[in-house]
Amino acid sequence: MESSDNASNYSASKYRTPDGAPSDIVIFSITSTEKNTMKKALPIRELQILLIQRKGWPYAGQWALPGGFCNESESMYDCALRELQEETGVTDVHMEYFNVYSKPGRDPRGWIISHAFFALVHEKWLANRRADDDAADVRLFPVEEALQMDLAFDHREIVTDALGKIREKMLTTTIAKEFLPEEFTISELYQVIQTVVPDFEERNFIRKITSTQSRKGIIEEVLDRSGQPKQSNRYSQRAAQLYRFTDLTPQLSIYS
Amino acid sequence: MESSDNASNYSASKYRTPDGAPSDIVIFSITSTEKNTMKKALPIRELQILLIQRKGWPYAGQWALPGGFCNESESMYDCALRELQEETGVTDVHMEYFNVYSKPGRDPRGWIISHAFFALVHEKWLANRRADDDAADVRLFPVEEALQMDLAFDHREIVTDALGKIREKMLTTTIAKEFLPEEFTISELYQVIQTVVPDFEERNFIRKITSTQSRKGIIEEVLDRSGQPKQSNRYSQRAAQLYRFTDLTPQLSIYS
DNA sequence: ATAATAGTGTCTATGAGACATTATAAG
DNA sequence: CTTATAATGTCTCATAGACACTATTAT
């Protein structure tokens, strides 16, 4: 108790304690499907999340977020990293903690406080996994479809919140880079932003991002070995300039 | 276990479970001290946080963030609200969850996963408390001073993170309103922003906020009953226009 | 040549930023 | 009348936003 003065007569165990502190991870990826037209064109991109089908009680058979219980010897972040690795084989991706879910009764197994992360995984990493085990119980779903499903626990709420969070972050930070190759064209960047934030529309996008003083530091032109601008004609007839993100972290303010 | 198919033979308790899930609250307030000059002047404002002095083990005698253990029947947010109310008597303030602290060994009492909130409390609410019980074991400290202290647990890290968070939010959202009266002058707003974000400087502040099309919706002029602009000469010789925040939530983007 | 995507020119209205100037009221 | 703070004028250059136009290359 608080009034005792050393560890030997401290007893937290007289209180009811949580039955578990899991992490749940909303793993986002953007899939690309080549258009089967004759002409070169940008692929069709879709924002997807990874779900697993539950085997046992509770919510057996229903789809749920990947995740699992935390051990005493790890932090929540480490726990989530471990689960992410187990589920996708992927390490070294962008993962962020964003909320805790603790409403009484949210888990029939008891008093379980869940810690929600989102991860942004480039499809090329998930491709490996899908080749390895094309298990029917681990799948990518388009986000909009996932939000229509009857997910286990309060996972629909978690997915909704995660989606809101990455939409905000997509517009205010440079996380778009997590979904793009190192070098990309302006069209690809624009398309990735729109895939995550469908309402996004910016007519003069290329000028905003490349020639306005306040923003031009965010991305930079890629040059080849001879110092010439490096271009790509992968998605278009006319070759497009390649860009990469810089290390600059944009600071936004409503007062300046 | 996961492979069983109903609640009766589910047993989470065979695993080690956390010894507690507390909330810790970084309660920010801005104190105003009138300058004792002859002339009217803006008060000296200082960003402070509320700390309590621990009585028992562990960290007896050291200063710590207010907070306490969550019960099974409440959510983390409700827990934090309850603690906030117990500590300050205040309800109905801006409080936000911002991070979890779960590093192994962070609490000598065992495996304790702490959920950190920050709250923004107008000094007028804390004034009551300070009159009631001027207890030496609950005090406001200037943030910079608190960060120099040897706080209990990992509370210095929590305070550092909370400070970073409210600095960011001060510039990107309208939380400044939590530290201001309903009606305020531009100078007061400017001063509040600077109190939280000392680096903030904006020469043409009044024009940015009142006459640029993209931002002018954030605050609006206050009019009196007869429809005339309402002014205040509380802090200055020449009366200044009063403003209030609107309900508008500014949307920021690095791409537009 | 055609089509498809990349990228620029150009024009107007608005905003940013710096500084000087005027306005108001207390003492 | 002096002083302190509030607020506007003014000037230059940058940016926003719209839309027409040119550029490049596969077919």
Image (cartoon, coloured by chain):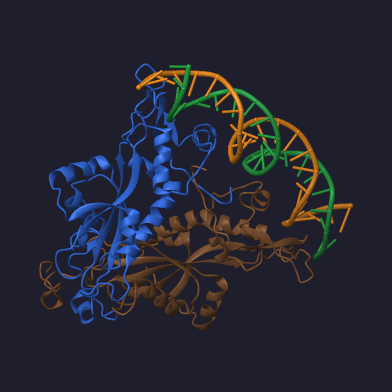
Chain colours: A brown, B blue, C orange, D green
Q: Is residue A24 left or right of residue B74?
A: right
Quadrant position of residue B244:
top left
Residue D21 percent coordinates (x, y): 82, 43
Image quadrant holding the N terminus of chain A, namely bottom left
Residue C27 drawn above or below residue B139: above
Quadrant position of residue B232:
top left
Q: Is residue B121 left or right of residue D17?
A: left
Residue B127 drawn above or below residue D8: below
Residue B138 shows up from this direction: yes
Q: Is residue A182 left or right of residue B136?
A: right
Residue B21 percent coordinates (x, y): 24, 67
Residue B246 shows up from this direction: no
Q: How many marks?
A: 0
Rendered residue at 28%/42% (across/down): B122
Residue B60 percent coordinates (x, y): 17, 67
Rendered residue at 41%/47% (across/down): B170
Which one is in front, D12 or A37? Answer: D12
Which one is in front, A43 or B75? Answer: B75
Residue B52 drawn above or below residue B8: above
Residue A106 drawn above or below residue D21: below
Quadrant position of residue B213:
top right
Residue D15 percent coordinates (x, y): 64, 44
Which one is in front, A156 or B247? Answer: B247
